[in-house]
Image (cartoon, rainbow, N blue to C red):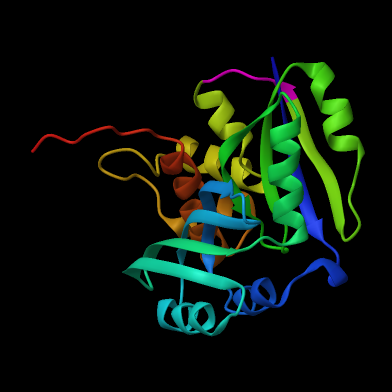
Amino acid sequence: MRYVIAVAYPKEAGINQLDRRINELGLEYRAIHRMELLADNTVAMFAEGRGDVEELRRILSESPAVSEFSITGDDTGFFSYTCYTADDLTRMLMENRRESSYLIDMPIEYTDDGGLRVTYIGAEAVFTDALADQPEGVRIEIERTGPYTPSPRHVISRLTERQREVLEAAVYLGYYQEPREATHNEVAAATGLSESTVGEHLRKIEATVFSSLHIDAIDH
């Protein structure tokens, strides 16, 4: 069993008006935790993000593509349910999943440069056909692939190369020790990055790791 991490980029002509307006908000930590293509060609999506919630509500309420939505949370972190008309990129992802034997490992993540990062899981043979056809308006880039192991190693494989570099330095310097033995500034000095960039990378690393956990119940 193997995994393939691919990033799908909608070309300029393939970006619909709703996505364009949401992208302009510059939301952070955007990840899709559940997405279903319905019989009426609409998509039901459960997603996570951080940013201007009120502006997002305004955009969704004004969009003719959105039939219903609900948002819980605030600018520091929110979850949203949205039902909207499927665009080409979403339809491609969902229809390919129905027609092929591979699985999509959720969440699907938005990249900083406007793509959708998708992790596929399956036998090696299924990936050749699944990723060979690139529909009009979408460009697909293979980020990495390897044997699939459902362990913390797999979670780390979902980080970018720079994020893994920052995480390695943070762990080595004791950033995650209790009490904490390193600061953002010390991690920045070790990686040659700015303190603000290190802080951003660490937040995204933690979001990726925590979103991979499955917590059924918490006893108080």
Q: In the rendered image, which quarter is residue 76 located in?
A: bottom left
Check residue 149 for magenta coloring. Answer: yes
Q: Residue furthest front?
A: 40
Q: Quadrant of the C terminus?
A: top left
Total numbered labels placed on residues in the image: 0
Residue 100 shown left or right of residue 104 in the figure: right
Residue positioned 73% across, 63% down in the render: 113
Residue positioned 60% across, 79% down in the render: 64
Q: Residue furthest left?
A: 220
Residue 209 shown left or right of residue 217 in the figure: right
Characterize the magenta stretch by its predominant secondary structure.
loop
Q: Is residue 181 above or below residue 15?
A: above
Report the front residue among 159 and 42.
42
Q: Position of residue 148 (x, y in %)?
A: 64, 19
Residue positioned 67% across, 60% down in the render: 86
Q: Is residue 110 visible?
A: yes
Q: In the rendered image, which quarter is residue 3 located in?
A: top right
Q: Is residue 161 visible?
A: no
Report the front residue among 142 and 170.
142
Report the front residue among 168 and 92.
92
Report the front residue among 12 and 143.
12
Q: Is residue 78 above or below residue 8?
A: below
Q: Position of residue 59 (x, y in %)?
A: 53, 82
Q: Quadrant of the N terminus?
A: top right
Q: Position of residue 53 (x, y in %)?
A: 42, 76
Q: In the rendered image, which quarter is residue 130 located in?
A: top right
Check residue 197 for magenta coloring. Answer: no
The magenta-colored residue range is: 146-150
Q: Position of residue 43 (x, y in %)?
A: 59, 56
Residue 12 shown left or right of residue 54 in the figure: right
